[in-house]
Image (cartoon, grey):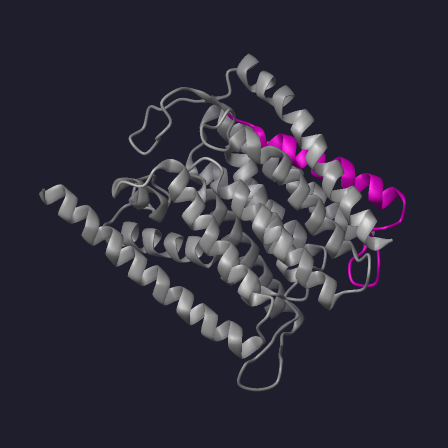
């Protein structure tokens, strides 16, 4: 029975998003909420409607409310109030994204609603209670420490997907992979038909329904709200699925390392850490000659490979995999920069 319910949740969310996306696209065009290729880092050649994340959020919201109504999303690990808080926080992110897509907010203004959303989650009691220790006993965290760690983790995930959103289908594809792997993890860790499992599979379906519209050449973009909502949900689900931080790090490792590298580089050069440029890994892949789809496919393949590997590893194995992932990122970055410089010289 649980398997059929999971399929219903997944397929319903995908169909809903696929039906809502064309409507959201029309609304974005009508109200001129369009991403125009005016900056050098923008690689699309024509204006593209924004607000695509609204279709994902609405689909996620509708399916979650239906399952909540029938009593399938509440147990002793996550309460109905916490699920309501997740929805409210998601609504704040989508609204903030709408404002940014429409009015092009300043970076400090963009930060306000994401901060409020993450604080709401922490205030609801969702925190990192422990992490497994490969060298000894499980590390348990007191309330304040666990709440601070959860705040930093979720906010970090929000900005990882925000900065990752540079190529068609990249954030959406990564979110589908991440939510499916978290769904599988939650099946092993949690009770049958747990809220965490349903939330993960509903998110996977909602984003998958959007992906055909966002695959290169994209007909609609996620927009600010969609990109931060994806990272937010992955961050929250990683905590709810039993503090599977290492698993999520393996899925999102390359984007996270890329964000850390780019931000560090900007600060070193005296620039704003949130200033836009073409130094991200996905742009480097384009610079050396890979096509748009090849670049996205390669990055999704790496995320899926390391994420799937985590399903078969214990804590020490995940630590080794994280070290290997870091080495892969370093080698990849050095190789891309070297190839680019050689091309420039020629």
- Look at the magenta stretch and give its main secondary structure: helix
Furthest-bottom residue in this view:
136
| Residue 228 or residue 177, whichever sits in front | 177
Furthest-top residue in this view:
30
Horizontal side of residue 279 vs 317, given as left or right: left
Rendered location of residue 114, percent (x, y): 56, 44
Point 76% across, 37% down: residue: 12
Vertical relation: 132 (above or below) 206:
below
Point 41% across, 71% down: residue: 323
Q: Is residue 92 visible?
A: no
Vertical relation: 222 (above or below) 265:
above
Residue 63 painted magenta: yes
- Quarter residue 238 falls in: bottom right
Point 75% across, 51% down: residue: 198
Q: Is residue 109 visible?
A: yes
- Magenta stretch, residue numbers: 50-79
Vertical relation: 287 (above or below) 317:
above
Rendered location of residue 64, percent (x, y): 77, 42
* Quadrant showing the C terminus: top left
Horizontal side of residue 192 vs 238, given as left or right: right
| Residue 283 or residue 29, whichever sits in front | 283
């Amino acid at each position: 029975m649980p398997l059929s319910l999971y399929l219903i949740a997944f397929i319903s969310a995908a169909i809903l998003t696929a039906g809502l996306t064309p409507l959201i696209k029309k609304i974005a065009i009508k109200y001129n909420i369009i991403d125009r290729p005016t900056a050098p880092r923008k690689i699309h050649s024509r204006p593209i409607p924004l607000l695509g994340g609204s279709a994902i959020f609405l689909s996620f919201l509708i399916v979650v409310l239906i399952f909540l109504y029938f009593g399938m999303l509440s147990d002793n690990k996550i309460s109905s109030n916490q699920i309501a808080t997740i929805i409210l926080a998601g609504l704040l992110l989508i609204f903030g994204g709408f404002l940014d897509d429409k009015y092009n907010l300043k970076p400090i203004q963009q930060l306000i609603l994401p901060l409020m959303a993450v604080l709401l989650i922490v205030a609801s009691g969702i925190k990192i209670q422990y992490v497994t220790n490969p060298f000894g006993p499980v590390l348990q965290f007191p309330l304040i420490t666990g709440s601070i760690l959860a705040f930093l983790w979720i906010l970090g995930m929000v900005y990882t997907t925000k900065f990752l959103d540079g190529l068609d289908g990249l954030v959406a594809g990564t979110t589908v992979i991440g939510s499916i792997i978290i769904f599988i993890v939650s099946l092993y860790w949690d009770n049958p038909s747990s809220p965490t499992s349903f939330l993960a599979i509903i998110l996977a379906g909602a984003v998958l329904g959007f992906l055909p519209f966002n695959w290169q050449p994209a007909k609609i973009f996620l927009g600010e709200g969609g990109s931060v909502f994806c990272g937010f949900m992955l961050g929250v689900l990683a905590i709810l699925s039993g503090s599977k931080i290492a698993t999520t790090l393996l899925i999102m490792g390359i984007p996270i390392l890329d964000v850390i590298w780019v931000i560090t580089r900007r600060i070193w050069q005296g620039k704003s850490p949130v200033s836009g440029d073409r130094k991200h890994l996905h742009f480097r892949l384009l610079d050396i000659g890979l096509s748009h789809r090849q670049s996205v496919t390669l990055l999704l393949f790496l995320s899926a490979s390391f994420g799937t590997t985590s399903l078969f590893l214990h804590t020490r194995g995940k630590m080794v995999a994280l070290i290997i992932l870091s080495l892969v990122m370093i080698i990849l970055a050095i190789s891309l920069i070297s190839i680019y410089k050689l091309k420039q010289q020629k």
